[in-house]
Image (cartoon, rainbow, N blue to C red):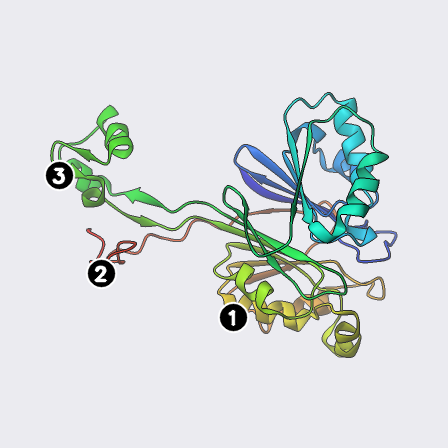
Amino acid sequence: MRELVVLGTASQVPTRTRNHNGYLLRWDGEGLLFDPGEGTQRQMIHAGVAATQVNRICLTHVHGDHCYGLPGVLSRMALDGVQHPVHLHYPASGEPMVRALVAVASPGVDLRLVPHGAAGHIAEDLEVRPLRHRIDAFGYRLTEPAGRTLLPERLAAAGIAGPEVGRLQREGRLRGVRLEDVSVPRPGQRFAFVMDTAPCAGAEELAEAADLLVTECTFADDDAALAEQYLHLTAGQAGAIAGRAGARSLVLTHFSSRYTEVAELEGQARRRAGGAVVRAAEDLDRFGFPRRRAPEIGAREPGTDRPART
């Protein structure tokens, strides 16, 4: 199961209808909690999200609206008897703040601190890129490894069926038939999380070909001067990042409390988002991933100059 559960959508100041940040990504058997601001533990209850579902916590930076909910979440994990290791990823420069927040949480969680200070992979399939904010900030991208889509007609022509299909997938060759002969490349799905930042190369790289892209959208286009002053994105800038990157679905969040309605911001982003489906998030919304990209018949085999066999 792959799904984004939005726990909060406010920026620095929460409102009557918007909690501080918090986003849970369900990715197959793993749960990644991004930027738990104040009230995240309570929002998890409203969303039906159990603390036991969280395997990783990812902080983009250590401004309070992105991390002050951490002690409560960790304390709830301890109370619920979470037995599995929980990895906490965060910018290395935020170490003093992270240590302080962890120190006031209830003990009992197998918490593993994993600071990072530069672009690159920080865990299997999980990578970061630096953003442009007032303190060190990093966005995250989760990428499923590329695979292959089997073609039933080719399997039938090769006389491969039943348990032999699984054996061919495991071993790569069976009775002279290669896996490449009966399948086509299937790109892995991508999730990208871009929070507090002005436009920058890191945001563009994270968004590249994302199936589901989450970006901050603190200001409307009319308030571009404020966005530049505080190093945040306008709605149009968020949409433009998605459009240039070829993202398929864009979720907008982190709205300034000056906007009681965000339909206009959604429209501003949509006008620059290319073919991406654009939605302004509300607290407790759930977003599924778009259907997988169709395999490209005749696409090049990865790492070769030959067309994929079809």
Image position of 202 (left or right of 182): right
Identify the residue at image location x=11%, y=36%: 176
- Asked if 235 appears above or below 11 in the picture, the reply is below
Q: Separation of disc 2 and disc 3 at Cα?
A: 26 Å
For badge 3, the amino acid type reads Ala
Q: Separation of disc 2 and disc 1 at Cα?
A: 27 Å
Viewer-proximal residue among 113 and 292 = 113
Q: How many numbered marks appear?
A: 3
Q: Give x and y (percent) for residue 48.
A: 71, 33
Image mark for residue 157: 3
Image position of 61 (left or right of 116): right
Q: Give x and y (percent) for residue 15.
A: 87, 54
Q: Which numbered disc, 1 or 3, marks the residue closer to the eye?
A: 1
Image mark for residue 305: 2
- Asked if 232 appears above or below 89 in the picture, the reply is below
Identify the residue at image location x=57%, y=34%: 30
For badge 1, the amino acid type reads Arg
N-terminal label among 2 and 3 = 3
